[in-house]
Amino acid sequence: MEWVVVRIARVTGDPRDRASGYLVDTAADVLGVPAGEVAVARDQTGRPRLTGAARGLHASISHGRGVVAVAVSAVTEVGVDVERERALPGEALARRWMTAADADWLTDRPAALHTSAFLWLWTQKEAIGKARGTGLRGGGLRQPLVLPPVWPDPLGSLPLRPVPGSTAGVACGVLSGGLVLAVAGQDRLLHDGAADGIRLITDPREATAP
């Protein structure tokens, strides 16, 4: 199995009504079992936990602004975050909440890319926090990142980069449709050949309620 399987779909209405069902469908597809054999519970931190036939798989959910994303992994605790691009004061927000290195890196990008760059930083920090089970508590927005001198990456790509000071890895990219997606795992593993990578599935159908 890949290091992480990530799946994205459009939603209408409240995405919270569809996120758990979409995670169940995705885990069932990964395992090749009927969806009725998979269920979702929540642990004490609110993190989704797969049960039934999918017990032992790690999972994460993100939703909002007409989109839902789920991530499933057999090898690592995982976190996923997705954001839709919209007008934001990216430079000001980065200066207020993130590290000086983050803010300087964003400022060095062309002004037209500041929103995308801010969401590229934000989603990675969210995904790392979800993989750790801490969210953004305890200074998560100040988590250092690898800041590439040449950016953005090719549209639709999710290059995996190490998380400084840890064994974790995080992949992030700008997708078509104005989406920015990040997925993180507590154990990177790829350099040991323990997994094949990240499989991204962009679902043409709308995620449905369970």
Image: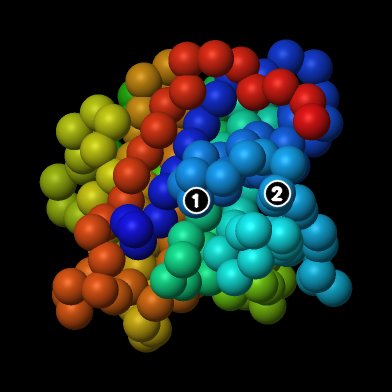
User: Is 115 placed left or right of 92 in the picture?
Assistant: left
User: Is 198 placed left or right of 100 in the picture?
Assistant: left
Q: Quadrant of the N terminus?
A: bottom left
Of the residues shown, which amino acid type is indicated by label 1? Leu
Residue on which the image places disc 2:
37
Of the residues shown, which amino acid type is indicated by label 2? Glu
Q: Quadrant of the C terminus?
A: top right
Res 111 visible? no
* Mark 2 neighbour class, 10 Å CA radius: few under 14, some 14 to 19, many 20 or more: few
Foreground residue among 65 and 99 = 65
In the displayed structure, would residue 76 be above or below residue 49? below
User: Is 199 placed left or right of 127 in the picture?
Assistant: left
Quadrant assignment, res 35: top right
Q: Residue at x 39, y 83 (%)?
A: 166
User: Is 144 placed left or right of 40 in the picture?
Assistant: left
Q: Residue at x 47, y 23 (%)?
A: 203
Q: CA distance from mark 2 to mark 1?
A: 10 Å
Residue 88's mark?
none
Which element type, helix, strand or loop, lies under badge 2?
helix
In the displayed structure, would residue 75 be above or below residue 149? below
Foreground residue among 145 and 63 = 63
Which element type, helix, strand or loop, lies under badge 1?
helix
Spot occupied by residue 167 in the image (x, y as percentages of width and height): 36, 82
Q: Earlier along the polypeptide chain: callout 2 or callout 1?
A: 1
Res 198 visible? yes
Spot occupied by residue 12 in the image (x, y as percentages of width and height): 72, 14
Residue on which the image places disc 1:
31
